[in-house]
Image (cartoon, helix red, strand yellow):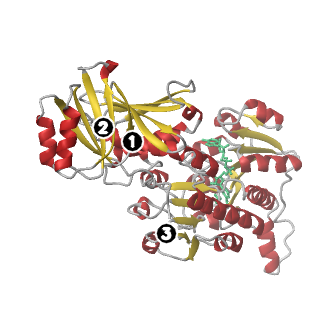
């Protein structure tokens, strides 16, 4: 049974989806302190949040059960993404469910600001009839600058065009052709855009680049009396600089739905008469909340029950069918990683190269490489390494992982070959899949073979002389060590040259027996490698 924790106010429609799913239980707890969230996460496989819950590195650390965080909404700035990735936790969001509502709120704020709706309504409530005091400005014919032309920015543009406004925009990721098609005058430099605006609205995520993108210097370049709207994230417009510019008369007014700290700890801005503010209501409509809650429920259950990855912000998308299809390759590559990590020359790994050949080359090799990397690092790490964090963990340890692919079929319909570059050499191993699920080791260094890639493997290199295999078999027999499978390989397929043997054992030989084998004059090296048994669950995929 997977437990999904919900710590923010989620629409009941999302809850309904989860409650009707066998295999999922829902734990709804609101108003928790950060410490209480940390405790509750210990019992959770996944969590759904909105913007109120802040998932800091401290809350995400040491949560071995937690696998997935879903943000019912767009902005993931309340989740520490590097920390989540490091802990191997997938983070997903629901990108489109609240676009329309947020765009409508932005337009509503812009109109209300222009026509002084809030102060006029307040004066009426106070029993006054002030017609002169609240003369506004018309939107038609004015220029609206939009910083960030993604889903919400473009949706605002469309609505503002309907109000006969001219749209100028800035977004480094929108093509000039697309902007022209949409009737938007696109500027490649934000400093060229700001002087043109009567109104300016921001619709970017909050990132290091966008924090303070509208600041004192840019406010000073704008037309006197410009109106600023922020329904994206507090801090994209610098709050102190905005308050200064309003007080100085440079900015005519501002409409703010979002704040650097929510609720605002400093009320300087919200108390200014030229400021219209709402408590982060952009997405607060019945429709948007229902859409994001249902989608969040579908995302989390799809991931927990079917390994489906959609709208993840720290992992590429993979459908449930594709995940099931590549499961065997994920298993194979992880085993190659585990095997190479135990190679006697594995100390001081600098890089690893993984090559895909044949049918596997057409699959999601990035994920298969991540599985190899997790196998390579698993034994050496205290932390939980998995497909989500393997690349980051390798990078942090200075191990460069590269991959190459060729769809050409060689000796096998699929071949995955991995080589590690270490201080001591370049051990290589290659594996394939026989039938649908039988994993085989077909190459080790320069030797070709056909060995089972599971369980306890005794690998010894030796000179190809008669009687050696018999000698080892007899010794194992005398000590009660059972050989399940055996595979032999010879260099250049020549008698008397270098050879390798892989024995899959049912039980482990003692150190004394291994020392005895090592002491044989025709044996050059012996390794005992431990891999998971055949068909063992894959730690990250086979949950439940
Ligand atoms: N007030 C509210 O309740 C809501 C607020 N939001 C906020 O709105 C933001 C935007 O949402 P969407 O439009 O759905 O996201 P989106 O990802 O579709 O669009 C963001 C756009 O910003 C652009 N961008 C990124 N960095 C930029 C930069 N340095 N300069 C200019 N443009 C840049 C991107 O290219 C992209 O086109 C979210 O990140 C979220 O923080 C979203 C929903 C509700
Ligand atoms: O959960 C909410 O209502 C906030 C929505 C929001 O800010 C977002 O989706 O980024």
Residue at the location (77% across, 30% down)? 177
Q: Secondary structure at mark 1?
A: strand
The answer to whether 406 is drawn above or below residue 299 in the figure is above
* x then y, percent, for residue 111: 81, 58
Instruction: Name the residue rendered at 83%, 47% in the picture.
Output: 158
Left or right for 219, reference 419:
right
Gap in Å between the C-alphas at discs 3 and 2? 42 Å
Q: How many marks?
A: 3
Disc 2 from disc 1: Cα separation: 9 Å
Label located before the other in sequence (2 or 1) = 1
| For marks 3 and 2 on the same chain, the one whose residue lies earlier in the sequence | 3
**Other residues around mark 3 within 10 Å, as few (<14) / some (14–19) / many (≥20):** many
Which of the two residues, 1 or 358, is positioned nearer the viewer here? 358
Q: Is residue 397 visible?
A: no
Mark 2 = which residue? 502
Q: Picture coordinates of residue 19 (x, y %)?
A: 65, 74
Regarding residue 47, the answer to whether it shows in the image is yes
Q: Disc 1 to disc 3, how far (Cα)?
A: 37 Å
* Pick the front one: 363 or 516: 516
Task: Give the number of the disc on residue 44.
Answer: 3
Q: Earlier in the sequence, mark 1 or mark 3?
A: 3
């Amino acid at each position: 049974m997977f437990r999904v924790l919900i710590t923010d106010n989620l629409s009941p429609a999302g809850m309904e989806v989860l409650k009707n799913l066998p295999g999922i239980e829902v734990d709804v707890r609101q108003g928790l302190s950060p410490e209480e969230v940390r405790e509750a996460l210990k019992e959770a496989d996944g969590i759904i949040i909105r913007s109120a819950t802040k998932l800091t590195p401290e809350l995400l650390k040491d949560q071995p059960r937690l696998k997935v965080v879903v943000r019912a909404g767009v902005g993931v700035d309340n989740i520490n993404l590097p920390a989540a990735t490091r802990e191997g936790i997938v983070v997903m969001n629901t990108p489109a469910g609240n676009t329309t509502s947020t765009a409508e709120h932005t337009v509503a704020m812009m109109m209300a600001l222009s026509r002084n709706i809030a102060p006029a309504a307040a004066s009426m409530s106070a029993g006054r009839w002030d017609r002169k005091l609240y003369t506004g400005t018309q939107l038609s014919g004015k220029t609206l600058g939009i910083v960030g032309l993604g889903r919400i920015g473009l949706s605002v543009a469309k609505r503002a065009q309907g109000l006969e406004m001219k749209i100028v925009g800035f977004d480094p990721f929108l093509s000039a052709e697309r902007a022209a098609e949409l009737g938007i005058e696109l500027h490649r430099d934000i400093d060229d855009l700001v002087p043109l605006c009567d109104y300016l609205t921001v619709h970017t995520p909050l990132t290091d680049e966008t924090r303070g993108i509208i600041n004192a210097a840019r406010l000073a370049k704008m037309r006197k009396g410009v109106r600023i709207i922020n329904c994206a994230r507090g801090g994209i417009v610098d709050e102190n600089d905005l308050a200064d510019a309003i007080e100085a008369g440079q900015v005519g007014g501002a409409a703010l739905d979002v704040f650097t700290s929510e609720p605002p700890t400093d009320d300087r801005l919200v108390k200014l008469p030229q400021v219209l503010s709402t408590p982060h209501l952009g997405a607060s409509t019945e429709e948007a909340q229902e859409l994001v809650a249902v989608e969040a429920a579908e995302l989390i259950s799809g991931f927990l029950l079917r390994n489906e990855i959609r709208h993840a912000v720290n992992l590429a998308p993979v459908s449930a069918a594709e995940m099931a299809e590549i499961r065997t390759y994920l298993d194979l590559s992880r085993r190659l990683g585990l095997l190479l990590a135990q190679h006697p020359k594995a100390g001081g790994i600098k890089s690893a190269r993984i090559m895909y050949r044949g049918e596997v080359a057409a699959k999601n090799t990035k994920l298969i490489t991540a599985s190899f990397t997790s196998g390579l690092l698993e034994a050496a790490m205290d932390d939980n390494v998995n497909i989500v964090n393997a690349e980051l963990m390798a990078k942090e340890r200075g191990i460069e992982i590269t991959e190459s692919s060729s769809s050409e079929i060689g000796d096998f319909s699929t071949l995955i070959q991995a080589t590690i570059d270490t201080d001591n050499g370049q051990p290589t191993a290659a594996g394939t899949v026989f039938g649908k699920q039988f994993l085989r080791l077909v190459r080790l260094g320069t030797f070709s073979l056909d060995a089972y890639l599971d369980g306890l493997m005794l690998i010894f290199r030796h000179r190809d002389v008669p009687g050696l295999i018999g000698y080892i078999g007899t010794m194992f027999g005398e000590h009660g060590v059972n050989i399940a499978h055996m595979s032999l390989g010879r260099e250049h397929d020549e008698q008397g040259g270098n050879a390798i043997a892989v024995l899959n054992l049912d039980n482990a030989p003692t150190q004394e027996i291994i020392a005895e084998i090592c002491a044989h004059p025709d044996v050059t090296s012996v390794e005992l490698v431990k891999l998971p048994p055949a068909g063992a669950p894959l730690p990250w995929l086979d949950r439940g």
